[in-house]
Image (cartoon, grey):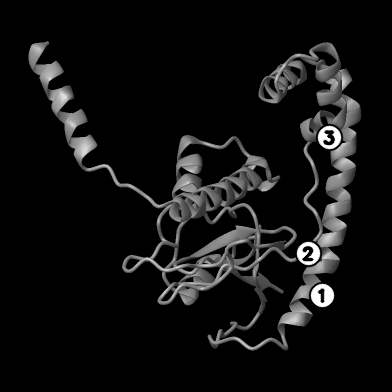
Amino acid sequence: MVRRKRRNKQNRQTMATTQITFTAEQIGYLREWLEGQSRQYVSTVMGDDFGDEEASEEDFASLCRATFNVDGFKQGEVVGRERGSTTKGGKQKRKAKDPAAPKRPKSAYMCWLWPKGMDDVKAANPDMVHKDRVQRAAQVWRDMSEADKEPWEKMSADAKKEYADKMKEYAGSSASASEGEDDDTNVECPDGFELRKGMFLGGYSSAGKTRYDSLDDAVSAMNGVDDAGGIVYDGKNYTIRKNGNPRVSQKSELLYLKL
């Protein structure tokens, strides 16, 4: 016991001596970056395709690795950087969200929460702080019967259908607009596919979650897979995705949509 306490004390001392300090500007940038990655993580988890099947620990671990990493950081001299700019030697340019893109539909819970749920909780608990109101509202939703949730479920389903219709129109217009854009990289598209820049398909096909190093390997593995709708390139690997509506990517992905 004494040795264990001594080791713990030594570990704390080591951590204290190796702690990294940041400037106010760096902390501000890191805070903004973490908020952006968190929004991306929540958006993926709340998406329809992520929940088509019961997500496993491996699925969440893979999503965390893809979302929270240091791939976008540059090692070297500290320089100022504006949001949305490209770092020298960086792998890709982070694109701002297209204001013309359809707004993602709300889940049934979010349809109820704002403003109905929060207004009810606030009226019943006028002295409660905002954070506690949100927690209380979440508990109220969990305790609601299926019958009470039904109107909000329908509202969410209608919003999702409307979103899917708008995305079909938006995806087509985005593809047409991108044909005239200049690109530093000459991207080839194999026969039988249509290239959609800045788009992706959610959910993996029955081919699995294998990451292929080349497009040719992914195309070969995709042959004969009935539910395969296309191939997504994330800048490193190619994955085979299932049929669905193309979505706007926040990670500048490339979608090879099967014709």
Sequence-first tag of 1 and 3: 3
Q: Quadrant of residue 89?
A: bottom left
Tell me which label, 1 or 2, sits earlier in the chain.
2
Q: Are marks 3 and 2 in contact (CB under 8 Å)?
A: no
Residue 80, image x, y percentages: 47, 67
Q: Give 211 or 228, whichever is nearer the viewer.
A: 211
- Dot 1 crowding, Cα within 10 Å, few <14, some 14–19, many 20+: few
Instruction: Tell me whether circle 1 and circle 2 mark residues in contact (CB < 8 Å).
Output: no
Residue 125 image-quadrant placement = top right
Q: Nearer the viewer, mark 3 or mark 2?
A: 2
Identify residue for label 3. 111
Q: Is residue 112 above or below residue 175?
A: above
Mark sitting on residue 173: 1
Q: Amino acid at mark 3?
A: Cys
| Quadrant showing the C terminus | bottom right
Residue assigned mark 2: 99
Mark 2 residue crowding within 10 angstroms, few (<14) / some (14–19) / many (20+): few
Question: Is any part of residue 78 visible from this angle?
Answer: yes
Q: Are marks 1 and 3 in contact (CB under 8 Å)?
A: no
Q: Is residue 186 above or below residue 228?
A: below
Badge 2 amino acid: Pro
